[in-house]
Amino acid sequence: MKKLVGAICLILTLLLAAPCALAEGEDEGDGQETQEQEAQEQETQETETEETTAEVPFEADIAGTWYHDAAVAAYRNGWMDGVGDGADESRFNGNDAVSRGEAVDAIWRMMGSPVSNVRIGYSDMDAYNPYRSAIDWAGESKVATGVGDGRFGWQDPVTREQLALMLYRCARMNGMGFSGTWMLLLETEDRTEVHDWAYEAVCWLYINKVMRGSGGYYLPAGHTTRAELATVLVRFYALTEAE
């Protein structure tokens, strides 16, 4: 009898221990799998962070400037490039004047680099012009047209009111802008110097704090600098994305 009772106790002990051992094994496996998954997720997050905060080649050149954040954002979004020889882009040259070709190219990139269905034969451009795709799109969409005499004037400096008109036309493409009857008196000392063809665009960008001017002046005929272009693009994009 004692032997029988001992055997039963041994069997019961083994049966009770088996689920515990199995459970411990499953817990260990789940833990290892969780650690591997967390490691993979961490690696993915680190990769995404590296892509988001990709090195800006001209960061040292613009350190401490008022346009630092805008220039970095314009570069990382692919709207503007650095300046340099060949592959070197170690400078931003924020005070340099922007040409009409450069301005249209940056706006085109901001709008997603849409493909144009037309090829406009401006007399001052050839098939190898670096801004050809952007300028063809601008001509087809009426964002920017030529300056007369069959020229686009891609090397001419873009004025602040010209840039305002280009951006306003982009806003109109997105269903934004003034509608119906409106009237606005610009709060600038030089408001009478804004051309009639640019006044609506200048007013809309002004009241939406995209392009305000400085020291009480809008400077409509002033040349747009690279620093100003980057700043205006970032503000305009934020405004249109919020709609």
Image: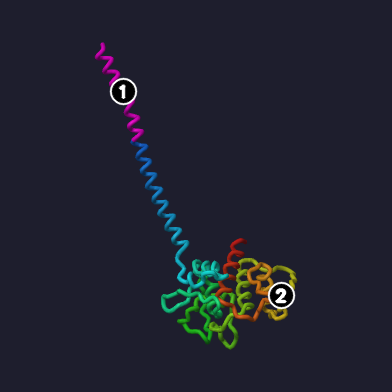
Residue type pointed to by label 2:
Thr
Q: Is residue 161 magenta?
A: no
Colour treatment of the image:
rainbow
Q: Residue at x 68, y 76 (%)?
A: 217
- Left or right, 33 with reference to 132: left
**In the image, residue 8 lies in the stretch drawn in magenta:** yes
In percent of width and height, residue 115 lies at 50, 72
Q: Position of residue 182 (x, y in %)?
A: 74, 70
Q: Looking at the rendering, in which quadrant would you find the N terminus? A: top left
The reply to whether discs 2 and 1 touch (Cβ–Cβ < 8 Å) is no
Give me the residue at 50% from left, 78% from top: 131
Task: Tell me: residue 122, above or below residue 228.
Answer: below
Q: Quadrant of residue 175?
A: bottom right
- Relative to 114, is 220 above or below? below
Locate residue 115 relative to residue 3 in the image: left or right.
Answer: right
Q: Amino acid at mark 1?
A: Thr
Label 2, secondary structure: give it.
loop
Q: Residues within 10 Å of mark 1 (few under 14, many from 20)?
A: few
The answer to which of 214 and 22 lies nearer the viewer is 214
Q: Secondary structure at mark 1?
A: helix
Rendered image quadrant of residue 150: bottom right
Upstream in sequence: badge 2 or badge 1: 1
Q: What span is in magenta? A: 1-24
Residue behind mark 1: 13
Q: Does residue 70 appear in this view?
A: yes
